Image (cartoon, helix red, strand yellow):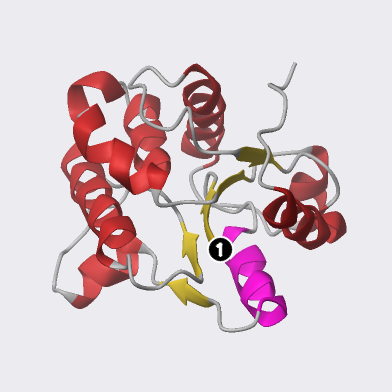
Amino acid sequence: MRAGISGTHGTGKTTLAQALCAHLPAHVTADEPYYLLEEEGYEFRFPPSLEDYRALLACSVRSLGSLPLLPAVIFDRTPLDYLAYMAATGADPSDEASAAALRPAFASLDLLVITPITPATEQLLPPAELPRLRSQMNDALLELVYDDPLHAWADTPVLELSGPLDGRLDAVLAALGQARRPARRN
């Protein structure tokens, strides 16, 4: 199974990806686009610029498409993350990406997992840098995932993890065993 985990910074995506790989035989975690680009010598601004998010988006699309022979991959971030960061900084995601490029990337996933900010994440995870950007990205991500203005991920099953942190692993494992699209959140 191939799953992608999306969410703003500081919501436990990497921890969840590592836990999934520990429980799913033969699964590996794909490196996060930020680290892939950093290894290539890309220098990010702080906070990241729109150009940085464009580079991350392109790298994320490549990452999802470059591992088609590996059916057992957990992606720590998806293109949706970078579209949401762009939206949070005032850009229109529809102007920043093409559906033609995004559709195959999302079609390669069996499940898209969303880790939104919740009261549990706020109490149990360490405080995140750039809290305003974090909140804006979270709101943009939730809007994008359900509205899909690019018509690129509507066919990808989505699991929003709004429950307690200690139930996340079981929720994702159950969803990977089911392959059905959950109802839209209210």
| Quarter containing the N terminus | bottom right
Task: Give the magenta-colored segment's residue range.
Answer: 13-24
Asked if 25 appears above or below 9 in the picture, the reply is below
Q: Position of residue 157 (x, y in %)?
A: 58, 38
Can residue 92 be seen here? The reply is no
- The picture quadrant where one finds residue 165 is bottom right
Which residue is found at the position 82% from the left and 46% from the top? 120
Measured as percent of width and height from the top left, residue 81 is found at: 42, 42
2 left or right of 104 in image: right
* Residue 8 visible from this viewpoint: yes
| Image spot of residue 80 (x, y percent) | 41, 39
Quadrant position of residue 21 = bottom right
- The dominant secondary structure in magenta is helix
Q: Is 4 situated left or right of 15 in this image?
A: left
Q: Is residue 175 above or below residue 119?
A: below
Quarter-of-image position of residue 7: top right
Apparent side of residue 106 relative to residue 138 in the rendered image (left or right): left
Q: Please tell me whether residue 14 belongs to the stretch shown in magenta.
A: yes
Quarter occupied by the C terminus = top right
Q: Count the numbered circles shown.
A: 1
- Judge the density around disc 1: few (<14), some (14-19), many (≥20) Cα neighbours within 10 Å: some
Amino acid residing under circle 1: Met
Return the x and y of residue 96 as percentages of the image width and height.
20, 29
Q: Which residue is mark 1?
A: 1
Residue at position x 64%, y 58% in the image? 12
Tell me if residue 164 is in the magenta stretch: no
Q: Label 1's element?
A: loop
Residue 129 to residue 101: above or below: below
